[in-house]
Image (spheres, grey):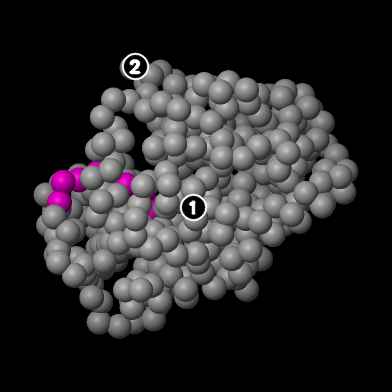
Amino acid sequence: MRFVYNAFSGRYSDSPRALYERLVADGGDHEHVWLADPAHAGAFPAGVPTVPVDGPEAVAALERADAVVANSHTELEWAKPAGALYLQTWHGTPLKRIHHDVLWAPEGRLARLDRDVARWDRLISPNRASTERLRGAFRFTGPVIETGYPRNDLLLSPERDEVRARVRAELGLAEGTTAVLYTPTWRDQEHFAEGRPDIALALDVQLFADALGEDWCLLPRLHYMMTDRMAPLSGPAVRDVSRHPDIRELYLAADVMVTDYSSTMFDFAVTGKPLVFFAYDLDHYRDAVRGFYFDPVADAPGPVLATAEEVLEALADLDGVRERCADRYAAFQQRWCHLEDGRATDRVLEVLLDGR
């Protein structure tokens, strides 16, 4: 079979990566090619076949594929071959509204993306609660298959402790350092702003360092659509991991996550480590920017806080956070992580190879 992969518009990442690596490890008479953004080509391991994501080579690869595996929209004009399977894994459990459910989108954007949706044959759902939301948001009429996300199998793998130790060493995190992974989502008004002005990190690094001391380190990870909008951060209390090639490794390296409305919360919850929510613009985001599918406060598996000072106080009391939020965390895992058992890759490969 001839496989073509596209993750986040040209990165080596996410569930397509997990599926590719399993197929390569298992052997078989397959051809593989990745659509690669030249800006991220260095993150592809040696030997991984690539073509530029926006060029005629990408169109040619897609038009001769037996199977296309993507985790987001493939915004190229191409004709899917007869009999080919286009598997859309998507890239996150939806909390914030997506596609046709958003409050606002630039003129013509949804129609352009719908041309890609029309090519999809199968759509992966990470959990039972997301299935109808994904189907409705994309107006997708084909099979939506509940499997969990292949990318998250690593979080439960026998190698997870080894990966954690390696990544912490690579980041220069000393033994006993509490690593805080900060994953703010993107905001439409910033992403689509004229001139694409720079953005600032809402959780100030100096404030973080002053409040928590030298045994703490902030790991900011911007959304992939915003990584070019802020200069890399540096200093003893911060490791800028926005360009780290594999967020799964960061989940393992971190001791706690701070996020807002990012779907990273659902993946991180697989680890069982504490979550703290910095929702400084909650009302505006809910009512004017994008909206939510469920109440992010009532259903949150950790404290939802409005100021940086409150976030830092919560981080300083992680034992208390765990105790106070234990029941909500367990309910959150049961609802959103029930398929994350380390075997999602197996289930998705059945779909991919059998065409079911």
Quadrant of the rendered structure where residue 336 is? Answer: bottom right
Dot 1 falls on a residue whose secondary structure is: helix
Name the kind of residue labelled 2 in the image.
Glu
Stretch in magenta: 71-78
Q: In this orientation, which residue lies closer to the viewer: 61 or 298?
A: 298
Q: Residues within 10 Å of mark 2 (few under 14, many from 20)?
A: few
Could you say where residue 50 lies in the image, as x and y percent from the top left?
24, 58
**Residue at horizontal 56%, vertical 59%?**
128
Q: Earlier in the sequence, mark 1 or mark 2?
A: 1
Q: Give the overall secondary structure of the magenta segment.
A: loop
Q: Is label 1 or label 2 in front?
A: 1
| Residue 252 seen from this side | no
**342 up-or-down from 135: above or below:** below
Along the line of sight, which residue is nearer the eye, 208 or 78? 78
The numbered disc on residue 114 is none
Q: Is residue 106 left or right of residue 177?
A: left
Is residue 326 highlighted in magenta? no
- Give how far across and how far down residue 40 sits, in percent: 34, 46
Task: Write down the residue under mark 2.
Answer: 194
- The three-letter code of the residue at mark 1 reads Glu
Q: Are marks 1 and 2 in contact (CB under 8 Å)?
A: no
Mark 1 and mark 2: Cα distance apart in space: 34 Å
Look at the image and say whether residue 76 sits in the magenta stretch.
yes
Residue beneath the point at 83% across and 43% down: 321
Q: Which residue is mark 1?
A: 132
